[in-house]
């Protein structure tokens, strides 16, 4: 279960639900306006689509403590759950540069890992800020060929002003950067980083030799002490 998180005593970041359906239209409007302002484009989503994500438990929403919407992000799956994308990150203009985008992405990442623990988590973005957030979460840049080959995945790019670049290069190049988090690779890295003291460390073998030497000396010293004690007793 993904628990709500209170941020800076100002915001609450949580999994969206039916309680937030009323905010879908405002969220979609801000997504579109933000894309226009950047001049890059974004996959357009209807309020109905956003509502579906909320009802499926596949969206993260941030609100003020008084209930005003602050930010939003949703997750999508591709290739039968082999890939998960955290998409549509948007923050209300009045709350940008507050750090809330980082908390929304982190919560969406947590939700993705919980719902689809074996899936590769992917993203494509032109935003340096989003790239930094993704990098901190463990993503790394990849070629676009490492992203899903499913046509429906790329269909979401059709409304972007740079879509012609993508099509002309046969989906090999674009202004967006592809990023990926592979849980299997991270498991391997964690396994390498974990030091098995008992079986892998020469230091352990050295420590055992030192320990045995110390114990042996203590044993010999005790034996000598007892021997001297017995000799003293015999002399009396």
Image (cartoon, rainbow, N blue to C red):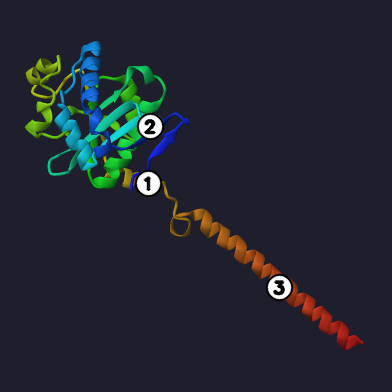
Q: Is residue 87 visible?
A: no
Provide the secondary structure element on which disc 2 rests: helix
Q: Which mark is in front, 1 or 3?
A: 1
Q: Which residue in the structure is indicated by mark 1?
A: 190
Residue of label 2: 103
**Residue placed at 32% from the left, 30% from the top?**
134
176 lies left or right of 194: left
Label whose residue precedes the other's in the sequence (2 or 3): 2
Residue in the image at 24% along x and 47% along y: 118
- Between label 2 and label 3, give the one nearer the viewer: 2
Residue 70, how many percent across, how many down? Answer: 34, 25
N-terminal label among 2 and 1: 2
- Residue drawn at 36 percent across, 30 percent down: 67
Residue 58 locus on image (x, y percent): 23, 39
Quick check: 1 left or right of 147?
A: right
Asked where in the image residue 176 lies, by quadrant, the reply is top left
Query: In the displayed structure, would residue 166 be above or below residue 61?
Result: above
Q: CA distance from mark 2 to mark 3?
A: 63 Å
Percent x, y of residue 233: 87, 86
Residue beneath disc 3: 220
Q: CA distance from mark 2 to mark 1?
A: 24 Å
């Amino acid at each position: 279960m993904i628990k709500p998180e209170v941020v800076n005593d100002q915001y609450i970041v949580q999994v969206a639900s039916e309680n937030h359906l009323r905010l879908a239209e405002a969220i979609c409007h801000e997504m579109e306006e933000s894309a226009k302002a950047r001049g890059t484009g974004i996959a357009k989503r209807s309020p109905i689509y956003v509502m579906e994500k909320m009802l499926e438990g596949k969206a993260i929403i941030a609100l003020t403590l008084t209930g005003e919407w602050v930010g939003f992000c949703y997750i999508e799956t591709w290739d039968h759950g082999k890939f998960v994308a955290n998409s549509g990150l948007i923050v209300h203009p009045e709350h940008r540069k507050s750090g809330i985008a980082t908390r929304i992405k982190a919560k969406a990442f947590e939700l993705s890992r919980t719902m689809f623990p074996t899936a590769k988590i992917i993203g494509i973005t032109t935003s340096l800020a989003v790239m930094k957030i993704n990098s901190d979460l463990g993503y790394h840049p990849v070629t676009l060929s490492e992203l899903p080959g499913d046509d429906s995945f790329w269909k979401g790019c059709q409304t972007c002003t740079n879509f012609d670049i993508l099509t002309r290069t046969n989906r090999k190049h674009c202004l967006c950067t592809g990023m990926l988090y592979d849980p299997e690779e991270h498991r391997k890295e964690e396994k390498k980083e974990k030091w098995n003291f008992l079986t892998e460390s020469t230091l352990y073998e050295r420590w055992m030799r030192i320990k045995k030497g110390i114990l042996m000396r203590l044993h010999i010293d005790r034996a000598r002490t007892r021997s001297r004690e017995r000799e003293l007793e015999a002399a009396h």
